[in-house]
Image (spheres, rainbow, N blue to C red):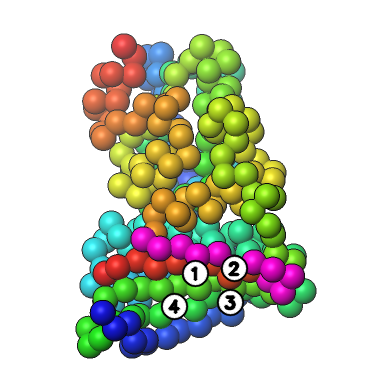
Amino acid sequence: MSEGVLREVTLALPMVPEMEIEASKTATAIAESIRMSPDRIDEVRMAVVEACINALEHSRSSDQEVFVTFQVLGDPDPEKLRIMVKDHGIGFSSSEVKEEPKGGPMGGKIKGPQKRGWGLKIIHGLMDEVEIHSGADGTTVVMSKMR
Amino acid sequence: MTETLNVTVDRRDGLAVIYTEGYINNQGGEEIAKVAYKLLEEGYKILLLNLAGTKIVNSIGISILIEIIEKMLEIDGKLGFCCLTPTIEKTFHIMGLAQYAPIYSDEASAVAQIRA
């Protein structure tokens, strides 16, 4: 199955509180435009919020911006929504992120260093495909959901 | 732009229902916690969070809800949730909340069952 990019939109979000909501509104509009079901749109919104919060809170990006690119993929009709959340921060390694506190959420506080891990766990749980690329020049979360 | 959370409370016999409307992020979670801890001081040990007016939450807000659950467990109280969107319910399961706080589909069944 071919996956050409039918449409692409990129937002450059300043690192100020609640910018994740702006990204989620754009995600909703684009997902609605390809007639994704409301429940699946809600899942996309939540995943976008978590990816943006991780970037806004943890990236320590020198340019103080987060870039969110939305791509509608398919040929000839829309089949998939791909979202890339990119920052130019310090990156992270998987060893820095605990997927789950010992004993589950009640076995340890999930504030502080656990937060990024929870965000990633939610993203994995809500989206069909997730890839994370992180290094010294920043982090990109690539996540997709079929229509 | 600010997505504020409105919180209201309905005090009943031995049970308080907390209604939320808006985004549960860090500020929203703190607002719910403030209300919940005030209710505990008033003697309410069974709390029901009705999230019908909330369509989006984030992991920081949920982490504060988990702190409230921990507090309720410490005092041998109960906290339940009702009227969640399918995505919020799925997220609560992903984060493990459902193991420690019951989730009900509607308020009437929640009120009937949470006292049991």
Query: Chain ID for label 2?
Result: A
Nearest to N terminus: mark 2 or mark 1: 2
Q: Please, which residue is most extreme toward the front here?
A: A1
**Does residue A25 sit above or below B114 in this rendering?**
below
Closer to the eye: label 2 or 1:
2
The residue singled out by tag 2 in the image is: A133
- Residue extent of the magenta highlight: A128-138
Residue B112 in the figure: left or right of residue B93? left
The residue singled out by tag 1 in the image is: A142
Query: Chain ID for label 1?
Result: A
Closer to the eye: label 1 or 4:
1
Residue A139 in the figure: left or right of residue B62? right
Q: Residue at x 22, y 88 (%)?
A: A76
Closer to the eye: label 1 or 3:
1
The residue singled out by tag 4 in the image is: A70
Q: Residue at x 31, y 39 (%)?
A: B83
- The local secondary structure at tag 1 comes to strand
